[in-house]
């Protein structure tokens, strides 16, 4: 036995024995700490953006248009990251995106209607997304372990779930008791602190020139994220508006409901992520689609009493607990196997912007025509079915010699 063999065996045991398998990759651990802090900041403040602006006097149709504007600006400005990241490196670019994300929290406190400050707030949010998301996903895709991707995504979701429990509760209380500047200022401080762990994360290599076939290999990610953007961008804002109105427009009650729902959603993430790693992804894809469709229908047709809305929030978030592990396991593995994970993420984020902006504009038109925001939640339903088909095509089944496992198929354009 060579000297390296015991180390290899020990590393393998770290991944296969109990909870230790989740924490053997130090780079993923540190990235998870960053993610938890970033999520905490978002849940303290960003989760209240829509309802804060609604209470400031903006109509739902204007909120949907503002959301579409952010995504359209992000799409237009996205090439900036192709200029900055190869020169500064992924880490520095991700730090810039993190700090810009923190800046958007106090910026929303300056918005008091459909005015120039709303445009400035949207511009900051768009620029933050341009620099942050392609770099973040490139880090996680490159540094994570393909064979344990579901578990690592699942554990990341648990840490984000903890932040999603603490953040809305704290943000709702601060908004109610101390006002916007205290709540949004605290979120900005936490968001800036999220940049610190990034300096201890190993930086992936980024080629200055795009490798051959980098963008051709990204079509699977583009279509998956376009469906994700269509599914989430409009329905999440519509549900937030519906909940807030049902809870008498109180920030503390809204934040408490978000916290309880996040706790319910975190329960299944790790178990379901491990279920994917053990080779059951095809069954999980079908079950996940069924649960998402059920959740959409419950949210779209529930009564508007506080008890009913809270119950539906808990049930639907718990039913959707497997969504991120199912989607991102396939997505990250496809990105890691591509010629350039960063450019894969760049193209996929453009798909998200297109899907999200399109559904937001459609929701704005429907609300302007007199439809309730709650009814626009149904727009997400077709995207669930399309994405399930895309996921089934991105994965392929190995010959059944031993436990069946699913692997990403070769990256080819999807219809």
Image (cartoon, rainbow, N blue to C red):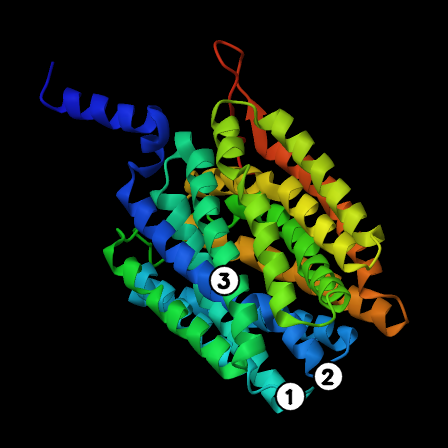
User: Which image quadrant is residue 17 in?
Assistant: top left
Give the position of the N terminus as an image quadrant: top left
Image spot of residue 19 (x, y percent): 36, 32
Residue denoted by label 1: 112
Give the position of the C terminus as an image quadrant: top right
**Helix, strand or loop status at disc 2:** loop
The circle on residue 57 is: 2
Residue positioned 56% across, 87% down in the render: 110
Image spot of residue 37 (x, y percent): 40, 60
Say which label, 1 or 3, has the lower sequence index. Answer: 1
Farthest residue, direction left: 3
Residue positioned 56% across, 80% down in the render: 108
Say which label, 2 or 3, has the lower sequence index. Answer: 2
Residue positioned 41% across, 68% down in the render: 97
Residue denoted by label 3: 167
**Helix, strand or loop status at disc 3:** helix
In front: mark 1 or mark 3?
3
Q: Is residue 323 left or right of residue 98?
A: right
Task: Work out how far the residue at label 2 is from the one at label 1, CA to CA, in angstroms.
Answer: 8 Å
Task: Work out how far the residue at label 1 is from the one at label 3, CA to CA, in angstroms.
Answer: 24 Å
């Amino acid at each position: 036995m060579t000297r390296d063999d015991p180390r290899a065996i020990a590393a393998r045991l770290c991944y296969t024995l109990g909870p230790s398998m989740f924490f053997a990759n130090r780079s993923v651990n540190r990235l998870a700490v960053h993610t938890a802090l970033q999520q905490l900041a978002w849940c303290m403040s960003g989760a209240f953006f829509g309802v804060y602006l609604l209470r400031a006097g903006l109509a739902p149709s204007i909120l949907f248009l503002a959301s579409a504007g952010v995504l359209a600006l992000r799409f237009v400005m996205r090439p900036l990251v192709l200029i900055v990241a190869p020169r500064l490196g992924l880490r520095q670019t991700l730090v810039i995106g993190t700090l810009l994300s923190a800046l958007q929290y106090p910026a929303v406190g300056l918005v008091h209607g459909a005015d120039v400050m709303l445009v400035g707030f949207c511009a900051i949010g768009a620029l933050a997304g341009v620099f942050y998301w392609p770099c973040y996903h490139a880090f996680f895709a490159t540094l994570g372990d393909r064979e344990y991707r579901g578990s690592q995504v699942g554990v990341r979701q648990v840490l984000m779930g903890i932040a999603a429990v603490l953040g809305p509760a704290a943000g709702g209380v601060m908004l109610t008791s101390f006002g916007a500047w205290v709540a949004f200022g605290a979120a900005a401080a936490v968001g800036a602190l999220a940049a610190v762990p990034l300096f201890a994360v190993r930086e992936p290599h980024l080629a200055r020139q795009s490798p051959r076939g980098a963008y051709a290999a990204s079509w699977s990610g583009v279509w998956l994220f376009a469906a994700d953007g269509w599914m989430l961008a409009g329905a999440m804002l519509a549900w937030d508006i519906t909940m807030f109105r049902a809870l008498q427009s109180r920030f503390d009650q809204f934040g408490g409901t978000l916290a309880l729902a996040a706790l319910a959603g975190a329960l299944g993430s790790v178990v379901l992520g491990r279920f994917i790693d053990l080779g059951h992804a095809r069954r999980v894809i079908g079950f996940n689609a069924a649960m998402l469709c059920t959740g959409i229908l419950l949210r779209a047709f529930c009564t508007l009493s506080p008890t009913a809305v809270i119950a539906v929030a808990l049930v639907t978030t718990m039913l959707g607990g497997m969504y991120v592990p199912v989607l991102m396991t396939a997505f990250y593995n496809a990105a890691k196997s591509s010629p350039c994970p960063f450019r894969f993420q760049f193209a996929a984020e453009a798909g998200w912007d297109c899907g999200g902006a399109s559904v937001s504009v459609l929701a704005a038109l429907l609300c302007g025509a007199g439809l309730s925001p709650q009814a626009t939640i149904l727009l997400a339903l077709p995207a669930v079915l399309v994405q399930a088909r895309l996921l089934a095509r991105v994965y392929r089944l190995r010959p059944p010699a031993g436990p069946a496992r699913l692997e990403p198929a070769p990256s080819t354009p999807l219809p």
